[in-house]
Amino acid sequence: MIDKATREKIISLIHREVVPALGCTEPIAVSLAVAKATELLGMQPEEINLGLSGNIIKNAMGVGIPGTGMIGLPIAIALGSLIGKSEYGLEVLKEVSPEAVERGKAFIESVPINIKNLPDSPSNLHVDVEVRSQGHSARAVISREHTLFVLLEKDSRTIFAEEEGAGNGDTQDADDVQLNFRMVFDFATTAPLEEIRFMKEAQRLNEEAAEFALKGDYGHSLGAMIRNNGVKYMGDSTLAHMVEFTSAACDARMAGAMIPVMSNSGSGNQGISATLPVVVFAEENGKTEEELIRALMLSHLTVIYIKQSLGRLSALCGCVVAATGSSCGITWLMGGNYNQVAFAVQNMIANLTGMICDGAKPSCALKVTTGVSTCLLYTSPSPRD
């Protein structure tokens, strides 16, 4: 059993890692940093200079920015300065409107926005923003986590600076509980239900995103295509429904739909992929609310556990990580014990390792589909001992 102190640390970690997000989190992190720097400056910038890690640039070039019908960093930067509020975190752009988008387009034309790659950045996730106006300047730096400010300056005067040694590159912070898979499994399956019931919010947000997407035309419309045409080829099966829902939510997100999702470890697609396959499987196989909550916890905490070692952003597609979480949750729902759930992790790694992340964009829905499809590609476990 996990003692109460460790349990509280795990719950705190989950609350930090499983949060609502609007839009792809890499350009949103840039918007957040710009919003914060603009707030510190106290006026609209006349110039914005940004230094970004390569992985931030990779994931921000081709993805839709919420509510704009546009892709890429310039509009995300402009809106972060114009209407972004840092207090909203990963929902920094939730007040976007058609009028704000028009202002953003004018901003791009009139305000110099200078972006440079930082090949030697201290983290794979690093955003350094400086804004200038009327002889004044402000700076905001996000590093390691999408909402973690490590430096704030106004007119070269330090307002806040993270203590030296507080961070550790792209790995977990020193104060975080060091997870292992036995701990993940035991926590998910034995923690008091009321302490983990908040995982239902992941179900609600991500199901709403999927249903929203299926009513529209976003990205590759992969989910809608499967719903409308997939029965003939894939059958009216649980697997087809898992793929349909998960890819639909991803499609909407990558296209810039104004719909929040519950993210995991700074990624909305990871949150979607760790949630919806488990939800669909549980609902279609008559599982109880408690079983669903515990399976969702097992899925999401497995993703957090893997990302503690892998880091926030890497060359590996995050959908692989998230689908591994779902495979654990589904294996447990099928009656799997600890050893069988651990074998599910091994099977997923054997199958999907090597899928690269070539940047956030509509084709992420295809990779999500690959990961979700793989969730059921193992032998159904026997009932738990």
Image: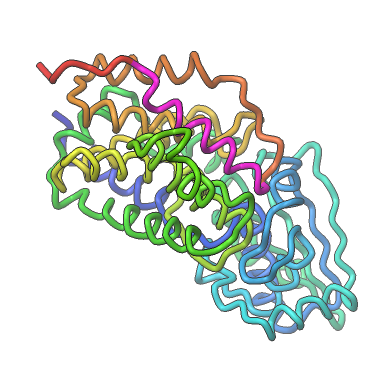
Q: Is residue 130 visible?
A: yes
- Residue 85 vertical placement versus 373 (above, below): below
Q: Nearer the viewer, residue 214 or 306?
A: 214
At 40% from the left and 55% from the top, the residue drawn is 206
The picture places residue 15, in percent across and down from the top left corner, at 35, 52
Q: Is residue 271 visible?
A: no
The picture places residue 245, in percent across and down from the top left corner, at 43, 48
Q: Nearer the viewer, residue 292 or 54?
A: 292
Quarter of the image where the C terminus is located:
top left
Quarter of the image where the N terminus is located:
top left
The picture places residue 319, in percent across and down from the top left corner, at 52, 36
At 69% from the left and 86% from the top, the residue drawn is 99
- Residue 231 vertical placement versus 19 (above, below): above
Work out which residue is located at the far front of the displayed protein and give it: 232
Q: Main secondary structure of the magenta part?
A: helix
Is 359 on the left or on the right of 318, as rendered?
right
Report the label total.
0
At 39% from the left and 39% from the top, the residue drawn is 176
Task: Please say whether residue 373 is one of the residues in the magenta stretch.
Answer: yes
Magenta residue span: 361-378
At 59% from the left and 33% from the top, the residue drawn is 317
- Residue 233 vertical placement versus 363 (above, below): above
Is 284 on the left or on the right of 78, as rendered?
left
Work out which residue is located at the far left of the displayed protein and give it: 385
The picture places residue 262, in percent across and down from the top left corner, at 42, 54
Task: Please say whether residue 279 is one of the residues in the magenta stretch.
Answer: no
Protein image colouring: rainbow
Q: Nearer the viewer, residue 43 or 174?
A: 43
Q: Quadrant of residue 243?
A: top left
Is 2 on the left or on the right of 152, as rendered?
left
Q: Nearer the viewer, residue 226 or 288?
A: 226
Q: Quadrant of residue 234?
A: top left
